[in-house]
Image (cartoon, coloured by chain):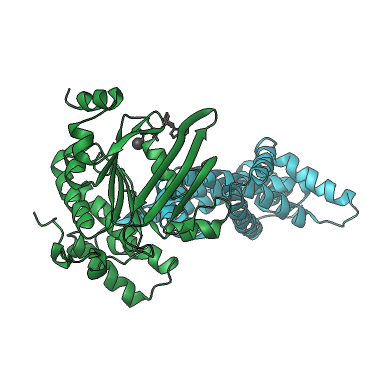
Chain colours: A cyan, B green
Amino acid sequence: MVDFTLWDILRNLLLAARWTIVLSLIAFIGGGVMGLVLLVLRLGRNRFADMVIGGYVQLFQGTPLLMQLFLLYFGIALFGVDTSPWVAACMALTLYTSAYLTEIWRGCVEAVPRGQWEASASLALSFGQQLSHIILPQALKIAVPPTVGFLVQVIKGTALASVIGFVELTKAGGMIANATYEPLLVYGFVALIYFAICFPISLVAGSLERKLHVGQR
Amino acid sequence: MSASADPSGTDPSGADPSAANPVLVSPHTEVGAPIVRITALRKSFGTNEVLKGIDLDVMRGEVVAVIGKSGSGKSTLLRCINGLEVFQEGSLSVDGKPLLHDSALAMRELRQRVGMIFQSFNLFPHLSVGRNVMLAPRLVKKRRADENEARARQLLARVGLAEKFDAMPDQLSGGQQQRVAIARALAMDPAVMLCDEITSALDPELVGEVLRVVESLAEDGMTLLMVTHEMGFARKVADRIIFMDRGRVHESGPPDKIFGHPETPELKQFLSSLHD
Ligand SMILES: Nc1ncnc2c1ncn2[C@@H]1O[C@H](COP(=O)(O)OP(=O)(O)O)[C@@H](O)[C@H]1O
Ligand SMILES: [Mg+2]
């Protein structure tokens, strides 16, 4: 039986927290890019694309993230492709994030008054110009709070990647708790670290929101 | 009021006033030839036929006012002209460009010939007044930056808002916002301007400043097709009045005839309802 000092526990948790952050970043950047592409496809008034993407969104919103992780991890293996928990976790979280973000952002685009589409169309702007110069800048302002709120969800969601053996903060916490017989202490630290990651994000979101409002003046 | 536009550019003696005015750019169409040609146009929303065969030519330099009850199809007609609504039958051309719904390129060509002013102004709230006016010429016409800004300032001066170039739309009154919208449409050098009840959302004391700008455009030879409830204004400024009823042009003619000697019972009833 090894003796763990408090510092040992904290240090190991912090090292594992890196992977929580990296996984969150990958999910958010990958999911954000993919969500934006899906959004533009969906706004392009192509019925078929709209239906397919709508189905995709329903699929990922209607099933637990845990199942998505399992299915991807074991599903990829089924095709004979050698997959690691790392790849499966990144893929599952990216797909999950893209489905939610594209739906959140679609709501924000729909909140931009129809008159903005009509005025910009009347001025002979192309669809892409309408989006990039008129619609998305206005939607962006509305999108900040729900997007950041969801970013926090994703960070907490990475904890589920532990079930397929990916060692991030939660998984490391479990392992250390088992080794030290100090579950309350260890999981208390784990919770604190999650809070320390998520809370500043909410703060930044608040100030960003205020800045965007000032920018409109 | 400072809002009134400067009419010094007009040349009442010339046959083509817009040619003498540096602020307005001449259309391709000859004076006296039709700028807007609408033939047998039919438009339905689902099973609800809203326009039931419209034939209408608007000549270059002509000012046409469209009147009629709410729901008679006035807005839909205007929106068909710049392709905001898709119609099912008939044909439509503006300044020689046919309206082809399926061609994004042709639509953009046509929309450059048509300026539209909305009841609700629809300024871009995230852009300053100057940028509202300069955006489309920059993106669509690739106008040079210095030229674009000079023209925007000239047009804002034209609508009495020279000093508002750097203001944001939400800092302006409704009347000022609507005048910016007019300057923004003019910046694309349209051959015709469509106005859909452009003073209906304004407080009564702000209506005059907008109507004066429209009137000065008419004096300068701009072709105008406007839906309006301002009968006094229509009578004064329009060359021709179109009375629409249930998706048809029910009666049309010069203002004196329409307001002074209405022929159909529908028009008589409409006009008398205005005095109630
Ligand atoms: N987007 C739409 N979808 C369905 N019906 C519409 C739409 N726009 C207008 N209508 C219908 O078309 C008719 C004419 O409307 P409109 O052109 O707005 O009339 P007006 O401008 O003369 O008041 C009305 O019966 C209205 O309900
Ligand atoms: Mg209307």
Residue A189 x/y as whole percent:
58, 49
Q: Is residue A4 above or below residue B38?
A: below
Residue A37 relative to residue B76: left or right: right
Q: Image quarter for residue B261?
A: top left
Quick one: quadrant of the C terminus of chain B?
top left
Residue A115 x/y as whole percent:
39, 46
Q: How many marks?
A: 0
- Residue at image position (70%, 38%) is A59
Most foreground residue, B153 or B114: B114
Most foreground residue, A149 or B207: B207
Residue B108 relative to residue B236: left or right: right
Residue B159 x/y as whole percent:
20, 59
Q: Is any atom of residue B165 visible in this view?
A: no
- Residue at image position (47%, 44%) is B39
- Ligand 1: image quarter: top left
- Residue at image position (68%, 53%) is A168
Q: Image quarter for residue B143?
A: bottom left
Most foreground residue, B129 or B90: B90
Residue B109 x/y as whole percent:
48, 61
Quick one: quadrant of the N terminus of chain B?
bottom left
Question: Farthest right residue?
Answer: A80
Q: Is any atom of residue B90 visible in this view?
A: yes
Q: Is residue B70 above or below residue A187?
A: above
Question: Farthest left residue?
Answer: B1
Q: Image quarter for residue B166?
A: bottom left
